[in-house]
Structure formats: C-alpha cells, structure tokens
Image (spheres, rainbow, N blue to C red):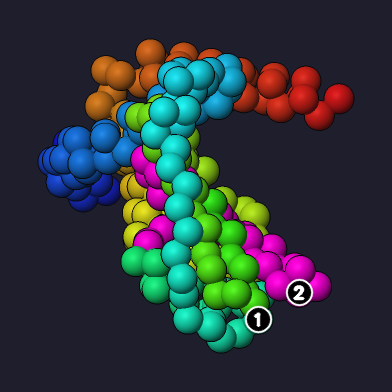
C-alpha cells in the first residue's frame, strides 16, 4: 500500500522533470559563456590579443558643446550622446586643473578611450576592436564589483546584470530540482549518494586547504 505522502510527492515528478529539461536547455548558452570565460580567466589565456587592436585603432577628435556637471556621470553621458557613442562607462577621471576629463567606454567587441579638453570643447576618441574571447571575458566580469556608484550606467549592462542574476537563480532551482528527482527515483539512490558524497568531500577538502 502506497503512503499518501509518497503519492503527493511523486505527482510533482513530471512537472519538475519537464522544468528541469526545458530550463536547462534555456540557460545552456549562458552556462557555455561562463564556462569558456572561466577557463580563460583561470589559465590567463589571451587568445588572439597579440593582433587585436593593432591595425584597427583609429584616433579622431570632435568638437563638442560645453557639457554640464563637472566630473560627473551626467557630464560623461552628455559627452557620449554628443559623440553618438554608447556603452558602459568604466570610470571617470576628472582633472580640473588641466581642464580634462578621461573615461573609458566598453561593450562587447569594442573599447573606447575618451579624452576631453573641457576648456576647448574638444573630445578625442580612440576605439579598439576586441576579439571574440575578450568579449566573453567582458560579459563574465560585467558589470563587476568596482565603481559601485556608477556601474550599470548603460541600459544593456543593466539588462545583462538581470539576466546573469536570473541564470544563477535558475541554477539553484535546477540543483534543488535535481536533488528532488534523485530522491524520487529509488534506483538512483545509491549512485546518487556516491556522487553527492564525492562532491561534498571535494568541496570541504579544497575549502579546508584554502583556509590554512
């Protein structure tokens, strides 16, 4: 005779299984991006960087109107709008004595150095194309922990921010869902315990070693 609780638990099995399958397929491209970029960061690989940016760097200057808000994010955004440029502003370096404003603008595939002569209303722009691998690393680290006051100042960076958080929440769901599916299928209990134990042992071992 089946236990009522067992019946109520098992009725969620088909739903969890389908969610586990389709959500796993949905997040697979993002996992691939994070996996490849993690390997590159872990091994400090710089594929193609020896040629990237050498032949495709072009510097040019453009006259702009006097921007408002000395050394502020609003001033940098005003300048970008006048230059018809978009991207995430990395930081803002305001040099009031020299009358200069310097800030980088980044997005996948492109890095731009913007140097502004505020007194003469001239902006110098130096764009650099980046290769595919560096684009992956940019996405992996974006928006990053630095410059908390201004990070996420580009709309698409904020959208990526939300997506990255959502992928983490979905991974947590898939993990708990996987544990649930394992508990329901009795034939998988023994091998499941073995792999769960190996995962816990390896985690606690490396944590213990790193904490010394």
Per the rendering, the mark at residue 201 is: none
Q: Whole-percent x and y of residue 33? A: 36, 33
* Residue 48 visible in the picture: yes
**The C terminus is located in which quarter?**
top right
Question: How many numbered circles are shown?
Answer: 2
The answer to whether residue 94 is magenta is yes
- Tags 1 and 2 in contact by the CB under 8 Å rule? yes
Q: Residue at x 30, y 19 (%)?
A: 188
Residue under label 1, please give it: 70
Check the image and report above or below for 9 versus 38.
below
Q: Would residue 201 be counted in the magenta stretch?
A: no
Q: Magenta part of the protein: which range?
A: 85-111
Locate residue 119: give its quadrant.
bottom right
Q: Does residue 41 lie above or below 95 as drawn?
A: above
- The spot of residue 42 in percent (x, y) is 58, 22
- Could you say which disc has been placed on residue 96 in the image? 2
The x and y percentages for residue 116 are 59, 66
Q: Is residue 35 left or right of residue 27?
A: right
Q: Nearer the viewer, residue 92 or 42?
A: 92
> Is 195 positioned to the left or the right of 93 in the image?
left
Mark 1 lies on a secondary structure that is: loop
Badge 1, how many Cα within 10 Å: few under 14, some, many 20+? some
Q: In the figure, 121 relative to 145: above or below?
A: below
Mark earlier in primary sequence (1, 2): 1
């Amino acid at each position: 005779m089946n236990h009522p609780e067992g019946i109520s638990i098992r009725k969620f099995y088909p739903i969890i299984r389908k969610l586990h399958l389709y959500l796993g397929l949905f997040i697979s491209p993002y996992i691939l991006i994070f996996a490849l970029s993690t390997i590159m960061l872990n091994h400090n690989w710089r594929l193609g960087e020896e040629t990237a940016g050498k032949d495709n760097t072009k510097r040019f200057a453009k006259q702009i109107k006097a921007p408002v808000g000395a050394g502020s994010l609003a001033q940098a955004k005003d300048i970008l709008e006048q230059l018809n440029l978009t991207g995430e502003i990395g930081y803002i370096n305001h040099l009031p004595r020299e009358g200069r404003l310097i800030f980088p603008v980044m997005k996948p595939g492109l890095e731009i150095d913007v140097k502004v002569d505020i007194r003469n209303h001239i902006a110098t722009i130096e764009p650099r194309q980046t290769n595919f691998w560096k684009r992956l690393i940019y996405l992996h680290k974006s928006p990053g922990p630095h410059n908390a006051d201004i990070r996420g100042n580009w709309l698409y960076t904020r959208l990526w921010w939300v997506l990255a958080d959502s992928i983490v929440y979905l991974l947590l769901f898939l993990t708990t869902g996987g544990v649930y599916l394992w508990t329901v299928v009795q034939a998988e209990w023994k091998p499941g315990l073995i792999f769960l134990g190996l995962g816990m042992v390896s985690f606690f071992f490396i944590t213990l070693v790193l904490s010394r």
